[in-house]
Image (tube, rainbow, N blue to C red):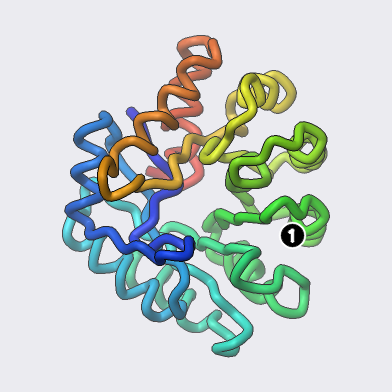
Amino acid sequence: MIIDCHVHLRHGDEERNEYSPEDIVGVMSATGIDHSVVFAMSCPTRRSIEMASAAARAFPARLIPFAYALPGGEGSVVAELEEAITRLGFRGIKIHGGECDLSGRVIDDVLGLAVEKQVPCLVDFIGRHKDLERMARGFPGLDIVTAHLGKYLCEDVELIDRFIEVACRFPRVYLDTSGVVLDGKIMEAVGRLGASRIVFGSDGPGPRTDPARTAREAIERVRKEGLGADEERAVLGGNIAGLLRL
């Protein structure tokens, strides 16, 4: 079973590309992915909830909705997130350091809600390992899935090592494999943390000309790392299935 923990209904890039649930399921069918965690970025929290909820209703057996937390400009979003989790069945919260302040005064209410509701947070720290450490220390009951092993398309070995080191100190920090370009780093993370702390993600869909490319390449990257069969199964699906209680 393959579960992609990182799929966009709306991307956070300059184009703000949107993908329909049908687009995403088409990518999944083309690449052998069984389930995908879906969310929308670069939009208010309420709109992100509407998009992810509609996607999950369209494909309840395939798509798993996460709510996007965008506190700050629109004020507190805790009530909207709580409704999504308790009433609409959302399984987690997505946070992006490029679109909201990760300092305590802004985001801690969201993290507290995640602990209370026992759902994970998928966080793009955009290379700021000190923010990860602050969250992990301040919220020991929170499951944090760190996007991109710490930073998207990062070629800075020392920076990714910092994120792995933080994860070594905090047992509820997980690392997602999307956007990883350093050869051998996934294997190294497995070696230092154990396969149970690494989860597969694609950060897809890909470009309009070939939307399945990103997922296909992300799966290939994990498979070429040389993991054992049990480790590979855990990374590609078993670990996130456990976190989401699937």
Q: Where is residue 22 in the image (x, y as percent from the top left)?
A: 17, 53
Q: Classify the position of the N terminus by image quarter.
A: top left
In the displayed structure, does residue 201 sit left or right of residue 132?
left
Q: Which residue is drawn at 48% across and 25% down?
A: 234
The residue carrying pointer 1 sits among few (fewer than 14), some (14 to 19) or many (20 or more) residues within 10 Å by Cα, namely: some
In the displayed structure, does residue 56 sit left or right of residue 6?
left
Report whether residue 117 is seen. Answer: yes
Q: In which quarter of the image is residue 49?
A: bottom left
Residue matched to label 1? 139
Q: Residue at x 30, y 70 (%)?
A: 51
* 216 and 49: which is toward the camera: 216
Across the whole image, how many numbered discs are drawn on residues? 1
Task: Say what amino acid the circle numbered 1 marks.
Answer: Phe
Q: Residue at x 27, y 36 (%)?
A: 34
Report whether residue 90 is seen. Answer: no
Q: Where is residue 62 in the image (x, y as percent from the top left)?
A: 24, 46
- The image shows residue 201, relative to residue 51, as above or below, that is above
Q: Where is residue 224 in the image (x, y as percent from the top left)?
A: 49, 15
Q: Residue at x 64, y 19 (%)?
A: 184
- The image shows residue 165, relative to residue 54, as above or below, that is above
Q: Classify the position of the C terminus by image quarter.
A: top left
Element carrying mark 1: loop
Q: Position of residue 54 (x, y in %)?
A: 23, 68
In the displayed structure, does residue 8 sit left or right of residue 68?
left
